[in-house]
Image (cartoon, rainbow, N blue to C red):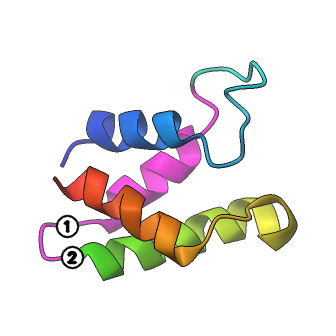
Amino acid sequence: MTFEKIKQVVDEWDPIGLLAMGAPENEYYFEVKELFDKLNNNFNVSDVSEIIYDIFIKRFGRDTFTESLDKCKEISNLILE
């Protein structure tokens, strides 16, 4: 998986809705970078979904990031395919 692939998936997901509101295209750069830095080819969908969930909760808080772990699993599948 590449940084660009992760960025594309996260941007299309737009979990906080910031891009839809006109935020700059690099809005999720730090979250994507952290995810890219943490991942390796040995991770499975559950591992990746927990990492995604933890990153967005840490960055935005539970009040702003309201996506479920199941949704993060869907995103993990897209990243890993």
Residue at image position (59%, 40%) is 14
Residue 40's x, y, as percent?
19, 67
Residue bearing the label numbered 2: 43
Kind of element beneath mark 2: loop
Residue 69's x, y, as percent?
53, 76
The disc label shown at residue 40, or none: 1
- Count the numbered circles shown: 2
Residue 64: quadrant of the picture:
bottom right
Residue 51's x, y, as percent?
45, 73
Residue at image position (28%, 38%) is 5
The magenta stretch spans residue 72: no
- Please tell me how crowded label 2 is: few (under 14), some (14-19), or many (20+) other residues with Cα within 10 Å: few
Residue 55: quadrant of the picture:
bottom right
- What span is in magenta? 26-44
Residue at image position (22%, 42%) is 2
Q: Is residue 48 above or below residue 78?
A: below
Amino acid type, residue under disc 2 in the picture? Phe
The residue furthest right is: 63
Residue 46's x, y, as percent?
33, 81
The one nearer the camera, 67 or 28, is 67
Residue at image position (30%, 33%) is 4
Q: Are marks 1 and 2 in contact (CB under 8 Å)?
A: yes
Seen in the image, is 24 located left or right of residue 6?
right
